[in-house]
Amino acid sequence: MKIRDRYAPSPTGLQHIGGIRTALFNYLFAKSPAGGGSGKFILRLEDTDRTRSEDSFVQNLYDTFDWLGLKWDEGPNNGGPFAPYVQSERTAHYKKYAQELLDKGQAYYCFCSAERIEDVRKQREAARSSESGYDRFCRSIESGEAAKRAAAGEQCTVRLKIPLGESTQFHDHLLGDIEWKNDDVNPDPVLLKSDGFPTYHLANVVDDHLMEITHVLRAQEWLASTPLHVIMYRAFGWTPPEFCHLPMVMGQDGKKLSKRHGATSIDEFRKQGYLPAALLNYVALLGASYEEGKDLYTIEELAQRFSLDKLNKAPAIFDYKKLEWYNGQYIRMMSDEELAKLCMPYAIEAGIFGGKKEEVHTEAQRHGENKSEEKKIEEQFDLFVKAIFLVKERIIFLSEVPEKIAYLFNEPEVPAAEEFIPKKCDLAQAISLLQIGKEIVRQLAEAPSDEEAENLIKAEAEKREVKLGDLMMPLRTAITGSRVSPPLFGSIRLLGAECSEQRVQRALDKLNDLR
Ligand code: GLU
């Protein structure tokens, strides 16, 4: 089967979960076996609403695709920079096709001012009329006369002439056969505005036709527009694409996913430290079931399995906890080095790392300078990778990393005395426990493995007749600045004997001062 589908966002807001799910389903469908390996996924910017479209949202769309690693297959200038289709650059097409409908008598010029339309609305309101939308006032103007007025420069729009007294049918892959009375469709909507820009309906239908879109997979909120679009396809004499309106994404309370539930924009998920692969994997399963008892899929595996028959009719429920689980899984599947690179921006922002490894590196090389500076950066990065190893099993978000490992890069402040005092102990006892810690910290730092460090400290605790936990607690606070921290032995080893000893001594000095 030939598949050409598209994601067609209007840049009037940030990219969010619902939109990205639509994009992803289109992408996967194009790459699925149904497309026989030659399906095309198209990105089209529907930016004809000039009052609501913003450049920053266009940028956000590109950044989101870039971050997710989603690529579209086609654009207007395939030879040049690979841009997507942009409707505001295609206005000549829409004018031409509006003219075609005028010529066929399927559309008409409307000269009604905004004031007149508002007056009609008010009169209806006062008369408690159930009628809404345009009252078809200009539909009866003789077409030759209307064309003359338009040619003379009178302000006008072009409206679709919906055939009345008929009904429109179409098939939706999930919802089945749908029939809509034409008299109930938005009455004679505007196709071309007075500024020459098309409305969403005209541009959407013309482009889906010109781009030979075979399948329209879009959010269910667009279902109400579909009868109108089908009427337009018929008016042009074109075959409509196949439709599949995707169920909404809801929060766990059954309401449409919104800020009240948590992050919704992809930007927020990125900043929180989600991995794109985890987000893609989870979002791809929102409303699709593969029934393999498996959770983790690469994008290629998802495409191999995707089919419209596997989509659910019921709304999808977005579970933030499940997404966190996915993120944890993907974090643990990465190598320490890969993870370190991804965590770098968070570390730089938190000020615990001097600069991006590659950048600083090349900067130093470019000036042919200072080998020692280069070496320092190298060492810092090595430490960073090793630090990642210490926390990898415990993190859900990349953004957690800097805070968890900051003590390895910058000496933490010595915490308050109570942080050093184990249960049922007093300050004097904490000091003597820490004193023992100081005596063995060098050996701990030099122990080749955690196991050997543990044996060593256990033996020491036994010899001194103190509890192991009591011995470790003040030592952990002195080394890491906190009672709760990543593994202590690994931390001591990374900091090295000298630095660890200094930290313990500093803590001892503070506690002794309090005595
Ligand atoms: N431009 C519409 C949007 O902003 C797309 C509707 C469609 O996919 O046909 O979501």
Image (cartoon, rainbow, N blue to C red):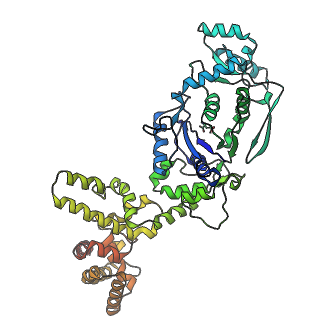
Residue 214: name its quadrant: top right
Provide residue 170's location: percent of width, then percent of height.
Answer: 76, 38
- Tell which of 431 and 127 is nearer to you: 127
Question: Would residue 412 be visible to someone looking at this image?
Answer: no
Q: Is residue 54 left or right of residue 182?
A: left
Position of residue 469 relative to residue 97, above or below, is below
Provide residue 381's location: percent of width, then percent of height.
Answer: 29, 63
Q: Residue furthest right?
A: 165
Q: Is residue 334 left or right of residue 373?
A: right
Question: Would residue 397 be visible to someone looking at this image?
Answer: yes
Residue located at (32% from left, 93% from top): 463
> Count of labels shown?
0
Position of residue 252 relative to residue 16, above or below, is below
Q: Is residue 450 left or right of residue 217?
A: left
Residue located at (34% from left, 78% from top): 489
Ligand 1 image position (quadrant): top right
- Tell which of 431 and 157 is nearer to you: 157
Position of residue 347 relative to residue 77, above or below, is below
- Tell which of 306 and 480 is nearer to you: 306
Provide residue 481's location: percent of width, then percent of height.
Answer: 33, 68
Q: Quadrant of the C terminus?
A: bottom left
Residue 217: name its quadrant: top right
Position of residue 143 relative to residue 453, above or below, is above
Residue located at (60% from left, 25% from top): 94
Residue located at (45% from left, 52% from top): 271
- Tell which of 284 and 271 is nearer to you: 284
Provide residue 408's location: percent of width, then percent of height.
Answer: 30, 67
